Image (cartoon, rainbow, N blue to C red):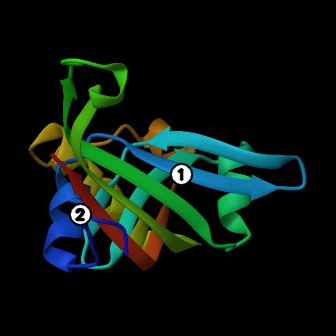
Amino acid sequence: MKKGTTTDRLTVNDVLDRADVLWLALSDEDGPYCVPVNHARSGDVLYIHSGLKGRKADILRTGSVVAFSAATDLVFKPATEHACSMGYRFRSVCGTATPEELSGDAFMHALDALTLKYGGEAMPYHEKGLTITTAFALTITSATARTKE
């Protein structure tokens, strides 16, 4: 395992909970596709939302394994004497997950988790917005955290 990496769930969960953006790596017959999404975590599940139509939703509906990454605590480290010393301090997570489209109470639970993470409180939804939105549970199958100081 690379220096500074761990599979410790507390470390992985801390990065996932604090990261503002989750990057999803997907693939279909047109090739690879990477997209940033909002996310919320509960246990080993990441919740995301999507429009009903589009490439992301189509790929996720297949149930094929997806990859994801997220990062927090990004601090630029300027070069001191040579370019090779330039870089970033960070904490990150890379992993894989299996997607499942949600409906009913599970759909609302996912939206509520996202609203709480990004809005800080429960909020009402516009009925029109709910009719054009779907949510997915991404069950984490593997995850590794890395810290670089």
Q: Which mark is residue 94?
A: none
Residue receiving disc 1: 24
The front one of 51 and 32 is 32
Residue type at mark 2: give it. Answer: Gly
Number of residues whose C-alpha sits closer than 10 Å to that of mark 1, classed few (under 14), some (14–19) or many (20 or more) = many
Number of residues whose C-alpha sits closer than 10 Å to that of mark 2, classed few (under 14), some (14–19) or many (20 or more) = few
Instruction: Estimate the x, y position of residue 140 in percent, counting from the top left.
Output: 42, 76
The front one of 132 and 10 is 10
Q: Residue at x 29, y 25 (%)?
A: 86
Residue receiving disc 2: 4
Query: Could you give the CA–CA distance between mark 1 and mark 2, rounded to whole angstroms?
Result: 23 Å
Q: Residue at x 53, y 51 (%)?
A: 24
Q: Which callout, 1 or 2, points to the residue nearer the camera?
A: 2
Q: Residue at x 16, y 38 (%)?
A: 119
The front one of 66 and 55 is 66
Relative vertical location of residue 32 with respect to residue 87 in this rendering, above or below: below
Relative vertical location of residue 1 with respect to residue 13 in this rendering, above or below: below
Q: Quadrant of the N terminus?
A: bottom left
Instruction: Estimate the x, y position of residue 137 in percent, counting from the top left.
Output: 45, 69
